[in-house]
Image: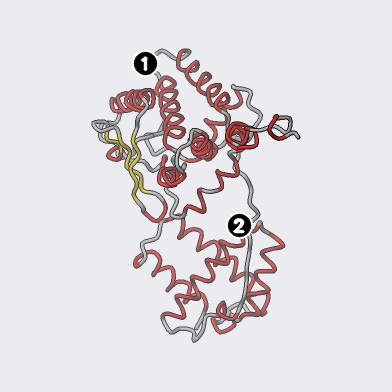
């Protein structure tokens, strides 16, 4: 069977039977296009058949990927191919998935997340609220956008949302009566996060009121100048702007606020299981990376709690 027909069948399955997100569908399409290009070269055939894919081809493809991409990207591309071949095996299009005959372990190097100190967070907030003071003409877009930016910063730091969750946030997901946010994370998993800080609530209500004047029936909470959902890139640029104004020499992204949210909670003694829920991690092993980041808390704990501090070799009862 022609491999392109097989991929078309799999993509139909992903879109209409598994109901995967548009981003996942797009990633699959890109990965398969890349694999077909490689396959055409390796077998010297412009119209490859599915039977051409064996464990030798897969091993060569992985070797090619490792030379070109970081381990995380390689794992994703291999996972795409594995899911595709699993589907073909399930549908009896192929007899055995070649991956069953391959032992492969791609280990992603553990990279500690970039976090902000509380002082750095305060510096960014200072610049954002200063920007608001400099834009007090209520009828201008600048006034609206600064209020939106502050609401975004407050929500990112206050809840640890992923950037995709923030940009896709709909009006109905924020309940101001009970001060909660309903989040649909990866795999459409739902979680509820309480808004317990008055400044966060105030910033969201202020922006909601301002944008509601121009767009009462909007679907998404955060909009751009064109009254469309704000993009990931717009949020990234906004954060970089305030980080630069605050003279913070770090690569700060929306995800930095997520890491900071988790790390600072851990330093305050919050149980890691609660942090796992706040972040929407399906496995606690994902959350445990923050235990490695929490050096400040570790040092403080060892300085104050370790039993070695309770005795000295010069104590009378230890010296003969």
| Percent position of residue 68, x then y | 69, 60
Q: Is residue 32 left or right of residue 90?
A: right
Pointer 1: what residue?
Answer: 138
Q: Which secondary structure lies at badge 2?
A: helix
Q: Which secondary structure lies at badge 1?
A: loop
Residue 293 in which image quadrant: top right
Residue 168 appears anywhere in the view: yes
Could you tell which of marks 1 and 2 lies nearer the N-terminus?
Answer: 2
Residue 50 in which image quadrant: bottom right
Q: 313 or 225: which is nearer to us? A: 313
Q: Work out whether 71 lies above or below 275.
A: below
In the displayed orientation, state which residue is furthest to the front: 320
Would you call the spot at circle 2 few (<14 residues within 10 Å), some (14-19), or many (20 or more)? few
Residue at 40% of width from left, 60% of height from top? 20
Would you call the spot at circle 1 few (<14 residues within 10 Å), some (14-19), or many (20 or more)? few
Q: CA distance from mark 1 to mark 2?
A: 46 Å
Q: Work out whether 65 lies above or below 238.
A: below
In the displayed orientation, state which residue is furthest to the right: 320
Residue 115 appears anywhere in the view: no
In the displayed orientation, state which residue is furthest to the bottom: 95
Q: 284 or 96: which is nearer to us? A: 284
Q: 284 or 119: which is nearer to us? A: 284
Pointer 2: what residue?
Answer: 72
| Percent position of residue 159, x then y | 42, 36
Q: Work out whether 4 lies above or below 283.
A: below
Classify the position of the C terminus by image quarter. top right
| Percent position of residue 131, x then y | 49, 17
């Amino acid at each position: 069977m022609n491999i392109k027909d097989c991929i078309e069948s799999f993509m139909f399955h992903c879109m209409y039977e598994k109901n995967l997100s548009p981003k996942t569908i797009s990633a699959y399409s890109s990965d398969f296009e890349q694999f077909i290009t490689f396959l055409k070269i390796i077998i010297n055939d412009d119209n490859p058949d599915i039977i051409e894919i064996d464990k030798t081809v897969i091993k060569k493809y992985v070797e090619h990927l490792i030379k070109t991409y970081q381990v995380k990207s390689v794992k994703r591309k291999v996972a795409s191919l594995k899911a595709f071949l699993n589907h073909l095996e399930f549908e009896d299009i192929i007899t055995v998935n070649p991956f069953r005959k391959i032992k492969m372990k791609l280990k992603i190097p553990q990279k500690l997340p970039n976090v902000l100190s509380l002082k750095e967070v305060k510096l960014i907030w200072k610049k954002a609220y200063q920007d608001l003071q400099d834009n007090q003409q209520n009828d201008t877009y600048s006034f609206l956008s600064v209020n939106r930016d502050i609401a975004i910063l407050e929500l990112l730091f206050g809840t640890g949302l992923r950037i995709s969750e923030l940009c896709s946030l709909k009006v109905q997901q924020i309940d101001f009566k009970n001060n909660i946010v309903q989040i649909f994370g990866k795999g459409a998993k739902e979680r509820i996060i309480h808004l317990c800080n008055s400044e966060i609530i105030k910033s969201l209500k202020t922006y909601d009121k301002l944008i509601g004047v121009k767009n009462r029936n909007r679907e998404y909470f955060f909009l751009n100048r064109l009254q469309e959902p704000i993009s990931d890139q717009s949020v990234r640029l906004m954060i970089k702007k305030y980080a630069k104004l605050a003279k913070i020499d770090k690569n700060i992204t929306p995800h930095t606020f997520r890491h900071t949210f988790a790390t600072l909670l851990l330093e305050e003694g919050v149980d890691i299981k609660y942090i796992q829920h706040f972040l929407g991690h399906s496995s606690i092993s994902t959350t445990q990376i923050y235990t490695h980041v929490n050096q400040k808390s570790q040092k403080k704990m060892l300085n104050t709690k370790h039993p070695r501090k309770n005795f000295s070799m010069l104590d009378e009862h230890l010296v003969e």
